[in-house]
Image (cartoon, rainbow, N blue to C red):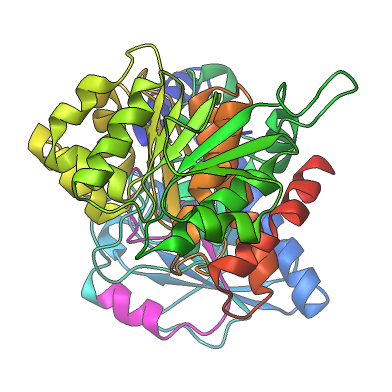
Amino acid sequence: MLEVWTTGQVRAAEDRLLARTPDGALMRRAAFGVATVVAGLLREHTGGTAGRRVTLLVGGGGNGGDALWAGAFLRRRSVAVTAVLLSPDRTHAEGLAAFRKAGGRVAGDLGEPDLVIDGIVGLSARGPLRQAAAELVGRVTAPIVAVDLPSGVDPDTGAVDGPAVRADVTVTFSARKPVHVLNTGHCGEVRVVDIGLAPELPDPDLIALEADDVGWAWRVPGPGDDKYTQGVTGVAAGSSTYPGAAVLSSGAAVLATSGMVRYAGWAADEVRGRWPELVATGTVEDAGRVQAWVVGPGLGTGQTGRDVLTAVFSDGVPTCVDADGITLLAATPSLWDARDPDAPVVLTPHDREFARIAEPHGITLGQDRVQAARALAKRLDAVVLLKGNATVVAAPDGRALVNAATSSWLATAGSGDVLTGLIGALLASGLDPWLAAGCAAWVHVRAGELAADGAPAPASLILKAIPDAIRAVRAG
């Protein structure tokens, strides 16, 4: 898994390391890492380093110093390096001296570089690029390598409030920061350079799952299993108006495991017709024993929906609540009373649903999505999966993970119903609810990639791609 630390944690670790490191050594180590990455990119894309042109965008402070030292190291590889100083009065003096000594040139314009290094601002900066920097960045047509983070992007939330660098590659040092998993669109590919910081770092603030983590956690049948031992998933979803939600969420549960799925609701005929291996009944009470429930997609928000949600909670098993189920809980908080306090609940809101259920508790969804999800998870004693291009999963005990989408193909009607069914199946298998939500989100993204294959794909195709997505993570 990828471990992520806040900028406060990283700065404190850097201070401890700096206290026992010769002056300037840490910066030179980091800059050498940047130069190595840049040289590799030049060789990959242009065939070599000799005679290639690199422009440095240099701000004041440490990040500008990193860029200047990187430029000095690149000069040793016969790269023509030009520095544009955006804050001449605050330029890192030692870095500038080393850069000039190595033959680097200071200029007032970009030139025609093969690559640009963004060293405008560092971890302590907040807010968008200033006008002069924004205009300069706006004229860049070459690939950009960002030092530590793309300038103009908030390091702890990934938020962008105005002009910001959109990097092709971001080089960071020893530790990923939240921006690297919360805003992959601006960071591009993230390369981590070891500068010896690891022994000084505390436990990470959050994590991001990788394919191996998901493959290890995903439940598959063994020689002693049968359809019941793998976990029986109950699905209470859909209505006469929205039968498709029932078909999608039930289908995702069927395809996520080879165990058993029971459907209860208005769309029994439609669901049974699409998934003949599923057991379908009209009500939760008639469904039979399950190990987990999925409730809410297409359910409706009237009295019938309230009755279904109450019946599901009363069953006393882990439950994933989505869509109309979340709206019902927000409108009628007394529905929580039917919940067994020992039965975990996973909530899967998008931004508007999050606002409905969180704002009555004084929790608002601002720029810090991780903190907002953590606050709601603690307040409701439930796992909260906050949907988005970077999906956040928070547990009541403070654990948090981020699953970054690699595209926007999942932004389509019915996609959330598929995710809910995946979570329900993993809950039924006995997986920790927080990890179940994270693994389901990971496979959901992979299924979306496979289904789209470069073109828009509806939820029904995302559903069909689930087995291939599971195969991919199981293969490592």
Is 172 left or right of 341, judged from the image as shown?
right
- Write the start and end of the magenta stretch as one range: 132-156
- In this rendering, would 222 be left or right of 37? right
Task: Give the residue drawn at x 59%, y 75%.
Answer: 457
Image quarter where the N terminus lies is top right
Q: Position of residue 70 (x, y in %)?
A: 59, 56
Task: Work out which quarter of the rendered image holds the C terminus and state it.
Answer: top right
Image vertical order of residue 315 relative to residue 206, above or below: above
Residue drawn at (79%, 70%), measured in percent from left and top? 44
Foreground pick, 337 / 66: 337
Residue 138 magenta-drawn?
yes
Q: How many marks on residues?
A: 0
Q: Position of residue 66 (x, y in %)?
A: 50, 51
Image side of residue 456 versus residue 44, left or right: left
Residue at the extreme top of the image, as rendered: 342
Instruction: Report whether 350 appears left or right of 352.
Output: right
Q: Which residue sits at x=70%, y=78%?
A: 52
Please indicate, yes or no, whether residue 422 appears anywhere in the rendered image.
yes
Residue 91, horizontal then vertical, whole percent: 35, 57
| Residue 374, percent from left and from top | 31, 30
